[in-house]
Structure formats: C-alpha cells, structure tokens
Amino acid sequence: MGMHIKAKAIIKECYEKNKSGDPNFRSLTNSMKECLRQTVGETYWKKAHDFLDHFLKQKTSPEDDKVEAEKRKAREAAEQKKRKEKRKNNWNYAELIKQKIINLGDIDLVDDDLDEVIKTIEQSTVLEELVLGDNELTLADGKFAHAIAKNKTIKRLYLWSNNIGVEGAKHLANALKKNNTVKELSLTSNGIGNEEYIADMLAINKTLQEIRLVNNNIGGPGGRKLAEARFWVTMS
C-alpha cells in the first residue's frame, strides 16, 4: 500500500473513532497527527500534514473551530503570563542598578512589586528612562514618589495606563516640585481627574518639557489651569 493511501486510511480511521466517542481520540487533530507521524515517518510527514490540514478544513464544523480558537486563545494567554512572570522575576536590584533604561511595562506590576525599583531609583547614578506603563500601579503610599523626588538622573518617566488616580498623582506632583531632571512624563489613562495639583507643580518645576495627560477626564478649572501652564501639556 502506498504511503499516500495509508495516510488517507489513518485519517479516516481517526475521524470515525473520534465521532464514536473513543476517549483516545477525543482531540481529532492531535490524534490524527500522532498516528500519521508514527506511521509515515518524518520523510513523508510534511506531505501527510498538508493533506491532513486540507481534510480538517473540510470536516471541522463551526463549533469545532470555535473550540479550537478558544483553546488557542487560552494557550496564548498562559504563555503570555509565563513570559510576564519570567520578565518580572528576572529584574532585581543587582541588575536594575546597572541599567540606563528600565522597561517593566505590561507585566502586571502592583505597588508591592516596586521595592527593588524604588531602591534603584534612589541609588542609581545612570538610570535615564523608566517605563512602568500598562501595569496595576496606584503609587498611593507615596514611596515611589519619594524616590523620584530624590533621583538625580531620570529624564523620561512613563506611567501610562495604570491606576494612579488622584492620591498617587498628588504624591507624584509633590515629588516633581523637588525633582529637576525629569523632562518627559506620561500619565495617560490614569484617572487623575480634574485636580489642579499638577498645574501647581508646573508653576514650580521648570525642567519638564512634555507631560501627557490624555484620557484622564481633566476639565473645568483644573483643565484651564493646565492649558495655561505650558504649551506642551497634552490632554487630548
């Protein structure tokens, strides 16, 4: 029997066992691939694999496609979570203190994860850019802001898409009244509201050259005061 005919027979057998409820063939795709690989060997695997894909496109129902899509989405989410955890765990003070640019964006950080970062901010002599965007930070305890007030090297501070809110932003604004190195600050999408404390900070801080406040529901007296503060304040 030719290899092509064998492959077709195996595919048909797997399909029938799957439909009959055989638990060893619960996953039609996996069972077909495993049986084919064992039977045809690696030499013929690619041809058989191409035929299998063609067969599955004809046989799978919309429900099957939906299930496979959900499984794929779950696998991708699990893999992304592992990557985030690995990235988070690989950053410690011994490594951070050497970096000119620290990027810890989009790894689900919360305030309690910042101890090593805060220590680095306070002691680094080389750090110029700090990216903490797209996390779950509030900065409400003031520890991060206190470190920023002391830092003498950071020029770019990116905190977009966190949960900083009014309390965290107040701490940060007070810190930036003392800091004279940060030139660029992003607080986009942080729910900091209509408060005037950032405008008050800008009246004192003469170092900042750009501040991004898009998607923060800023308006009213606070918004007008910000609009008058510096031409590079971005709110929309």
Image (cartoon, grey):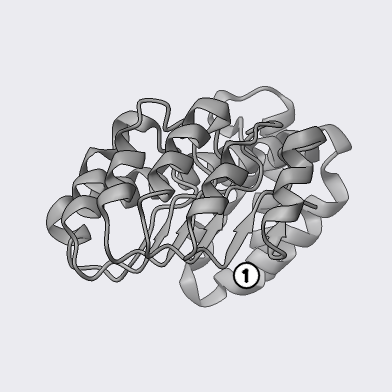
Residue type of the residue flagged with mark 1: Met
The answer to whether residue 3 of the structure is visible from this angle is yes
- Vertical placement of residue 180 versus 34, above or below: below
Residue at coordinates 87% horizontally, 51% vertically from top-left? 58
Residue at coordinates 64% horizontally, 36% vertically from top-left? 196
Indicate the position of residue 107 as horizontal and vertical percent values: 44, 45
- Vertical placement of residue 83 versus 75, above or below: below
Residue at coordinates 34% horizontally, 52% vertically from top-left? 87
Front-most of 142 and 207? 207
- Vertical placement of residue 17 versus 133, above or below: above
Residue at coordinates 60% horizontally, 58% vertically from top-left? 211
Front-most of 103 and 121? 121
Is 223 on the left-hand or right-hand side of 190? right
Is 134 on the left-hand or right-hand side of 195? left
The answer to whether residue 31 of the structure is visible from this angle is no
Q: Is mark 1 on a helix, strand or loop?
A: helix
Q: Mark 1 points at which residue?
A: 3
Indicate the position of residue 114 as horizontal and vertical percent values: 30, 39
> To which quarter of the image does residue 52 belong?
bottom right
Front-most of 210 and 65? 210
Front-most of 22 and 46? 46
